[in-house]
Image (tube, rainbow, N blue to C red):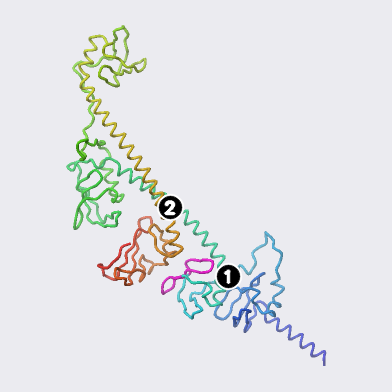
Amino acid sequence: MSFVAIGFFVVATFALGANYDRGQVIPEVKLKNGTVLHDLKVVGVGSTTVVARWAGGQGSIALTQLPQEMLAALAPAAAPKPAVTSAPIQPAAAGAASVELPSDIRLTSGFVMHRSVVTHWDEQAVLVSYQGGIVPVQLKNIVPEQRAIFEARKSEALAEQARKSAEQALADQAARRKELERQTKVAENASRPISLIPVESHPEEVFPGEIRLKDGRRLNEFVIRKVGANYIEAGWRGGGGRIEYELLPYEVLSQLTMTASTLPIAIESQESSQLEAPRPARRPPPTEVRLPSDIKLTNGFVMRHSTVTRWEEHAVLVSYQGGVVLIQFKNMVPEQRAIFEAGKAEALAAQAQMGATQDSVDQAASKLELVKQAKAAQWKEEDESNAEEISKGLRDHYLVKGMTKDQVKQAFGSPHDGTTIYRGRGLDKRGVVADRYLHYDDLGILTDWVDQNGNDWTNRVYH
C-alpha cells in the first residue's frame, strides 16, 4: 500500500512539472513581484529570460521572477552556459525581436492610448503618437504585461534608432553643405555689378506664379522695374516698392545676373553716393604721327620692336626684344622725342582712367572675397548653433527651423492625414488652441509655421 502511494506521488509530481513545459498552456502563473498571468504559454527560453504569451499580452519574463517549481521544470533549458565570443544568437533573442508592440497601450492609471505608434525610444521611456496627440510615456507607467513587451524590444529599438540617427546626421551634413554652396553662389551673384544696369536699358522682367522672399512674404505677378546698387524696385499684385538683394530668392538673382553678365564693372563717384554705369576705358588715341617701333637713343643705341607699356611725365617704360627698360625722353633722339612729347598728355589721361578702372575691379574683387569669407563664417556659426538647437528639439519634442521632414516627425509626430497640418497643436494670439501649418523649402527643410484657427486670419501667429 505504501508503494502505491509513493508511485502516485511521483506520477503527480511529474505531471505537475510537465504543465510548465515549453508550448504548454498554464492556466495561471503568479510571478514573484505579485503579477498574475493567465493562460501563459512559454515559446522560448534563454539564459536569463523566457519569452511567453498570455491572456492580453506577450513579451519576456526574467527567470528570477518565475515561481520556483516552474523554474525547476525549465532548468535544463534555462541553465546558464559559459560565454563564448562566437556563440550564435539564442532562440530567445529571436523570439523577443519578433514580438509586436501593442497598438492600444494600457497605463497603470487605467488610461488606454488607442492606435499608438512609438516614434522615439529612450532608456526608461518611449515617445508615443496616438489618436489624442504625441506624449512621452515612462515604461514604469505601462501595465506589467505590456511593459514586459517594451523591455524585450528596447535594446534592439535603441540600436536601430542610433543607426538611423547616424545616417540622418550624414544626410543633414550633406544637405547643409549643398545649401552652403547654393548660398555662396547667391552671394557671388549678388556681388556682381548687376546693380549698375541703367533703367532704360533693363527691360521689365516678369516672373510668373509666386515669388517668395526670404522674410516670408509671398508676391504674385512680380515685375522688376529698376535695379539699384544693392536693391531692386519692383511691382506686384496689390503693391510695389524697394527690395534689398539679401531678401531676393535665387531665381530672381540668377535672372539679374544673366541680364548683366556682359556689362562693365562700375566706378563709384567720390562726389556722390549714386552709382552710374561707367564708360569703357579709352585706349590712348592715335597721334598724328605714330610712335616709332624702333626707338633711337642719343648714344646711338636702337631698341628694336619697341612697345610702350607705361607712361610717366618725363619717361616711358618700353618693352623691346632685349627686355623692359625705362627710357627718359631726354635720351631719345630729338625727332622721336618730339613725337612722344606730342602724345604724352592724352596717353597719361587715358592711362589714369584705365588705372582707376583697374583699381575699381581690384576693390570689387577684394570686397567680394571679404563678403564670401564673412558669409561662410556666419553660415558655419549658424549651422553649428542650429544643429545644437535641432538636437534639443528632438530631445524635448519641439519644432526648430532647419529640421528635415523626418526630424519633424520624430520631434512632433506624424501630421494630420499625412499632410503638413497638425490639428490642434498650435495657439493663436488669444491663446486658443489652433491648427499648425508647416512650410518646407524645395530641399524639404522646415522654414516656418503658422498657427491659425479655422479661417480666423486676424489672430493667426507666425513662427
Q: Position of residue 449 (x, y in %)?
A: 34, 62
Q: Quadrant of the C terminus?
A: bottom left
Q: What is the magenta segment's predominant secondary structure? A: strand
408 to 250, vertically: above or below? below
Which residue corresponds to the image point at 52% horizontal and 75% vertical from the top-left? 142
Q: Residues within 10 Å of mark 2 (few under 14, many from 20)?
A: few
What residue type is disc 1 on?
Answer: Ala
- Residue 105 percent across, percent down from the top left: 49, 76
| Outermost residue, bottom side | 1
Range drawn in magenta = 118-135
Residue 460 percent across, percent down from the top left: 28, 66
Q: How many marks?
A: 2
SS label for mark 2: helix
Residue projecting furthest to the top: 300
- Specify the label residue 221 is tagged with: none
Mark 2 sits on what residue?
Answer: 384
For the residue marked with disc 2, what is the amino acid?
Answer: Glu
Q: Quadrant of residue 433?
A: bottom left
Q: Secondary structure at mark 1?
A: helix
Quadrant placement of the N terminus: bottom right
Nearer to us in this view, 461 or 195: 461
Q: Kindly identify which residue carries mark 1.
A: 152
Mark 2 / mark 1, whichever is N-terminal: 1
